[in-house]
Image (tube, helix red, strand yellow):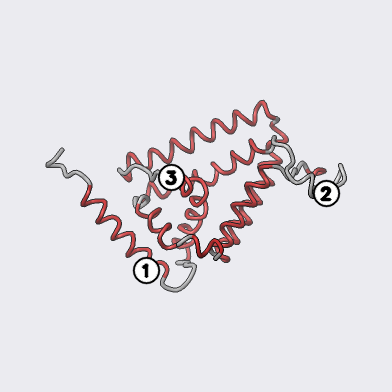
């Protein structure tokens, strides 16, 4: 079946879109979602190698000589990259390249910072990025974020990139995708508004 068969991209993207309608909230997520992933990759630089049993690499090789280690940070970037390519090979491939570029950049930064500063960078990034997104939802969207953790941590970077590509060049994974998603968002919003307490009830 594959990931494409297991994940209905229209369904999940429209669900995400229903929680991100206000322009400022969309901007907040555009600014802060990918930095969240970057900060995790910085922290995960200090995890042990995970492929040492399967790869017979010499102690000094092209990767380690540049401060790159096939650790949990690399594994995280790999999982994200494969997921995104399976969802949509065009935008997903761009997202995958960004994941590995972030892994390289995070590794180099972590090497310069050292663990004593890297965890502080991670903590500050998490606080700032989550605060920014919370403001976007609470002040502008006026709707609490979804409680779907898989969507929040795994799918959000791809959805943000997809949203940017749609805005810039009208991109869609396949013909009719954007229209179908918009119809699903409208239906979801009507359902949410019908359940939301009115001002008269407040």
Reading the chain from its start, which is encountered first: label 2 or label 1?
2
**Of the numbered discs in the image, which one, if any, rests on residue 16?**
none
Count residues near mark 1 (Cα–Cα under 10 Å), then give few for <14, some for 14-19, many for 20+: few
Closer-to-camera residue (33/13): 13
CB under 8 Å between discs 2 and 1: no
What residue lies at 45% left-to-right and 47% top-to-bottom? 29
Residue 96 in which image quadrant = bottom right
Residue positioned most to the top: 116
Question: Given this view, does label 2 or label 3 mark the residue nearer the observer?
Answer: 2
Q: Label 3: which residue?
A: 28
Q: Quadrant of the C terminus?
A: top left
Q: Position of residue 46 (x, y in %)?
A: 70, 35
Q: Label 1: which residue?
A: 179
Helix, strand or loop under label 3: helix
Residue 83 in which image quadrant = bottom right
Q: Position of residue 115 (x, y in %)?
A: 68, 29
Q: Position of residue 34 (x, y in %)?
A: 54, 46
| Count of numbered badges drawn on the protein | 3
| Mark pair 3, 1: CA separation | 24 Å
Q: Position of residue 65 (x, y in %)?
A: 82, 43
Closer-to-camera residue (47/161): 47
Side of 155 relative to 50 (left or right): left
Q: Label 2: which residue?
A: 62
Residue positioned most to the left: 200
What residue lies at 69% left-to-right and 38% top-to-bottom? 45
Helix, strand or loop under label 1: helix
């Amino acid at each position: 079946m594959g990931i494409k068969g297991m994940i209905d991209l229209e369904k999940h993207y429209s669900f995400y879109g229903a929680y991100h309608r206000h322009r400022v909230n969309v901007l907040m997520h555009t600014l802060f979602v990918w930095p969240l992933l970057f900060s995790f990759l910085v922290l995960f630089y200090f995890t042990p190698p995970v492929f040492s049993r399967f790869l017979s690499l010499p102690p000094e090789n092209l990767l380690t000589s540049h401060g790159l280690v096939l650790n949990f940070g690399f594994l995280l970037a790999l999982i994200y990259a494969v997921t995104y390519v399976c969802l949509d090979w065009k935008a997903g491939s761009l997202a995958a390249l960004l994941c590995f570029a972030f892994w390289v950049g995070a590794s180099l930064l972590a090497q310069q910072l050292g663990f004593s500063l890297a965890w502080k960078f991670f903590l500050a990034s998490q606080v700032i990025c989550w605060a920014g997104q919370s403001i976007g939802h609470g002040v502008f969207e006026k709707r609490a974020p979804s409680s779907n953790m898989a969507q929040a941590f795994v799918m959000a970077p791809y959805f943000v990139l997809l949203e940017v590509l749609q805005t810039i060049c009208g991109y869609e994974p396949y013909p009719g995708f954007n229209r179908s998603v918009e119809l699903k968002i409208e239906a979801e919003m009507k359902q949410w508004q019908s359940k939301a307490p009115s001002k008269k009830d407040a």
